[in-house]
Amino acid sequence: MNVKQIVAVGVMAVALVGASASAAFAASPPSSSSAASTCLPAGHDDAWPAYAQGVPGRDPGVRLWHDSAGWHIRVTHSSVHDRVFIGEIVTTGTLIDVKPVRLEKNDYVRLGTNSHTLAFRFNNYGGTDGVDFATHCAPFLEFGFAADGHELSVTHISIGATAHNPYFDPFVIRRTAA
């Protein structure tokens, strides 16, 4: 499923990366030519901001963090009824080493053409589902999440050990200089 399909069905509006998206997450450092032009050697993950580092608590919703192994996304909720989480990550760099975590029936993780997009669907029953991935030469990552057909409230998106909430969904996290 690509961004246009997600928007067309009204599940979530993933903004085009540009002037409006660059301000989506105010905690993101301003873009710099050194961050955009310097890539780590293949097999090493790119450098990302301090606020994205470390595992957030176990709050219901989407938990997102970065560490030395790459990026991690986990979803959960506190009900015994199932809840469907979908999401998409977009970059102009490449997404590598994609590993689904605890997939069940009807769940999927799909890497798009040229490894610039990653889409997922997790039919969650109160446990934890997720995906791990790393990046290469990615100046930014644009994230968009939804649950049960509606954009996910930013209060249910936790980033890094300090559990930052983005200001908007979708939002952008920009890479720091290596």
Image: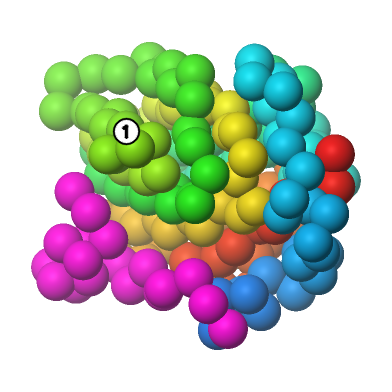
Residue nearest the observer in this picture, 59 or 141:
141
Residue 99 falls in which quadrant of the image? top left
Return the residue found at the far bottom.
20
Asked whether residue 83 is drawn in magenta, I would say: no
Residue nearest the observer in this picture, 138 or 73:
138
Asked whether residue 9 is drawn in magenta, I would say: yes
Residue 79 falls in which quadrant of the image? top left
> Visible in this render: residue 59?
no
Q: Is residue 176 left or right of residue 147?
A: right
Mark 1 is surrounded, within 10 Å at the Cα level, by few (under 14), some (14 to 19) or many (20 or more) other residues, namely some
Residue in the image at 60% along x and 33% along y: 136
Residue 169, x across and y down, in percent = 49, 68
Residue 109, x across and y down, in percent = 30, 30
Q: Is residue 55 left or right of residue 169?
A: right
Above or below 125: residue 63: below
Residue 103, x across and y down, in percent = 30, 19
Q: How is the image coloured?
A: rainbow
Residue 44, x across and y down, in percent = 71, 21
Residue in the image at 37% along x and 44% along y: 117
Kind of residue sitting beneath label 1:
Leu
Element under disc 1: strand
Residue in the image at 76% along x and 66% along y: 31
Residue at which label 1 appears:
111
Above or below 83: residue 45: above
Above or below 168: residue 123: above
Report the magenta residues as a range: 1-19
Residue 126 falls in which quadrant of the image? top left
